[in-house]
Image (cartoon, grey):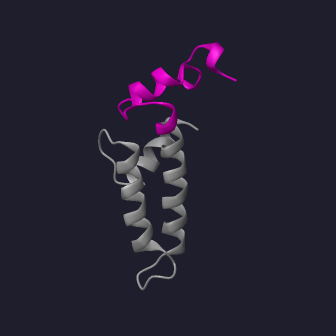
Amino acid sequence: MNYEKFEKALEILNIASRLTHAGLKEKYLKLSKIYHPDMPDGDAQKFKEINEAYKLVSEYMQNFRFKLDKDEFYEQRPFLKESKDWFYDF
């Protein structure tokens, strides 16, 4: 996982700031009902994106309770930090 994927997941789920895991699940259920392929306005591709985004953000939230911004992301995952230092180039 990198921050770009994480940020894209937040965008898909329309998350702009702090959120509880229960709030995330509520957003996920609402969006999945709208875009489920069996619904009249369903979209299989969008439904798949929503599921993947939910899994990614949910996994992050189960392990941490912090702000959902770039600095906090890299503070929690220092080895994913973008740097010109050789140590991070693997």
Q: Position of residue 25 (x, y in %)?
A: 42, 54
78, 24: nearer the viewer: 24
Q: Where 2 falls versus 54 (above or below)?
A: above
Can you name the residue that lies furthest to the bottom here?
A: 40
Is residue 69 a member of the stretch shown in magenta? yes
17, 20: nearer the viewer: 20
Location of residue 21 by image quarter? top left
Is residue 86 a member of the stretch shown in magenta? yes
Q: Position of residue 57 (x, y in %)?
A: 48, 44
Location of residue 18 by image quarter? top left
Q: Where 86 falls versus 15 (above or below)?
A: above
Can you name the residue that lies furthest to the right here?
A: 90
At 48% from the left and 25% from the top, the residue drawn is 74
Q: Position of residue 60 (x, y in %)?
A: 50, 37
Q: Position of residue 52 (x, y in %)?
A: 55, 55
Q: For this view, does 22 lie left or right of residue 6?
A: left
Q: Where 89 falls versus 17 (above or below)?
A: above
90, 57: nearer the viewer: 57
At 53% from the left and 69% from the top, the residue drawn is 45
Q: Which residues are magenta?
A: 61-90
Q: Quadrant of the C terminus?
A: top right
Q: Where 73 falls versus 27 (above or below)?
A: above
Q: Quadrant of the N terminus?
A: top right
* Circle count: 0
At 45% from the left and 82% from the top, the residue drawn is 39
Can you name the residue that lies furthest to the front here?
A: 22
